[in-house]
């Protein structure tokens, strides 16, 4: 799908770069020639990153205005943005904490909008830039215990469709990749809260089995690349057939 | 934090368990209502009401409500 130099010289900001999916996106994009700006909350993890094409790392908590401003100051002109930061509080609604719901909606839904707003206001997005947000199959398929997370991702997807229309005159594309369960910290969180039987049943729901973060990264690189120049407002499931 | 209160909270968390039917020695994993949603719910209840983060393996490792309560207490104090 994406050729070895499909992202050559494209400057891409990866938000949430130290997470499992975020770091896979970084590696995949680097292998395809992207110039990378990486941000995350964990300075030590960011410092340990070294990939081809790394321009800079910026330690910042983008859930705060202060963090977004710090990031903005360090950010060069961009051809791509990947928003891979997220949080998933799993609990039946009777025991959902208000603070957890708010934190989930804030980071998964509100912060991507605020960051895109800030990047646009600062004119940091080049003509024909590509924005890719990481959503989830949870937005489309009901699962007990996922109400807060699924709602936040469904809202993100709705926003992405609107942004795709709004930013089309600048030829800026906005898309989502919606992964199913991949081996990641969040999946480990699910495994810790699920019985063996529930985990096995969940795995069985994937015709191609559960995936790797690299599988998601491939789809992200495609959407960042010129190969996807006529693709916008799309929610691309990368889920081993889970939603079929 | 008392065992009696915990048993009451547990009964309320697990759907279709009648209040007052469980005791400290109850092996909750043998209850007919015990299923994957119960696991998720009890973990969430303990987090919300006791501020302790359990894992599914913690629930698998206890044989009674009394043992589970002791486990929660030990995690709360650590």
Image: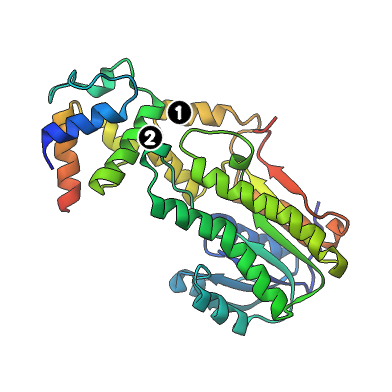
Image quadrant containing the C terminus of chain A: top right
Check disc 2 and report the residue beneath it: B40
Residue A4 in view of the camera = no
**In the figure, A67 relative to A29: above or below?**
below
**Element carrying mark 1:** helix
Residue A66 drawn at (x, y percent): 50, 78
The answer to whether mark 2 and mark 1 are in CB contact below 8 A is yes
Q: Which mark is residue A198?
A: 1
**In the figure, B64 relative to A86: above or below?**
above
| Nearer the observer, A47 or A127 | A127
Q: CA distance from mark 2 to mark 1?
A: 10 Å
Q: Residue at x 44, y 47 (%)?
A: A89
**Element carrying mark 2:** helix
Chain bearing mark 2: B
Chain bearing mark 1: A
Quick one: label 2, few (<14), some, or many (20+) residues within 10 Å? many
Name which quarter of the figure residue A239 lies in. Answer: top right
């Amino acid at each position: 799908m994406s050729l070895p130099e499909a992202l050559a010289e494209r400057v891409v900001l990866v938000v949430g770069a130290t997470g499992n999916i975020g770091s896979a996106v970084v590696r995949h994009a680097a292998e395809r020639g992207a110039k990378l700006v990486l941000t995350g909350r964990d300075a030590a993890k960011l410092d340990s990153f070294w990939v081809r094409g790394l321009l800079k790392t910026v330690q910042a908590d983008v859930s705060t205005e202060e963090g977004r401003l710090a990031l903005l100051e360090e950010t060069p002109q961009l051809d791509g943005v990947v928003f891979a930061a997220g949080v998933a509080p799993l609990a039946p609604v009777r025991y959902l904490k208000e603070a957890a719901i708010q934190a989930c909606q804030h980071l998964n839904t509100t912060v991507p909008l605020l960051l895109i707003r800030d990047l646009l206001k600062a004119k940091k997005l080049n003509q024909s830039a590509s924005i890719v947000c990481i959503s989830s199959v949870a937005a489309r398929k009901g699962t007990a215990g996922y109400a807060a997370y699924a709602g936040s991702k469904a809202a993100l997807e709705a926003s992405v469709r609107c942004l795709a229309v709004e930013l089309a005159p600048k030829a800026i594309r906005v898309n989502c990749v919606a992964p199913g369960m991949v081996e990641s910290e969040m999946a480990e969180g699910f495994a810790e809260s699920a019985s063996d039987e529930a985990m096995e049943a969940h795995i069985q729901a994937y015709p191609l089995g559960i995936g790797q973060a690299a599988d998601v990264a491939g789809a992200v690189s495609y959407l960042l690349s010129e190969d996807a120049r006529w693709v916008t407002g799309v929610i691309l499931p990368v889920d081993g057939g889970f939603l079929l | 934090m008392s065992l009696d209160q915990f048993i009451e909270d547990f009964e309320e968390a697990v759907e279709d368990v009648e209040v007052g039917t469980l005791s400290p020695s109850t092996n909750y994993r043998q209850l007919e209502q015990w299923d994957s949603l119960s696991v998720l719910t009890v973990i969430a209840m303990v987090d919300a009401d006791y501020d302790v983060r359990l894992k599914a393996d913690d629930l698998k490792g206890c044989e009674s409500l009394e043992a589970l309560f002791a486990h929660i207490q030990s995690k709360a104090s650590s």
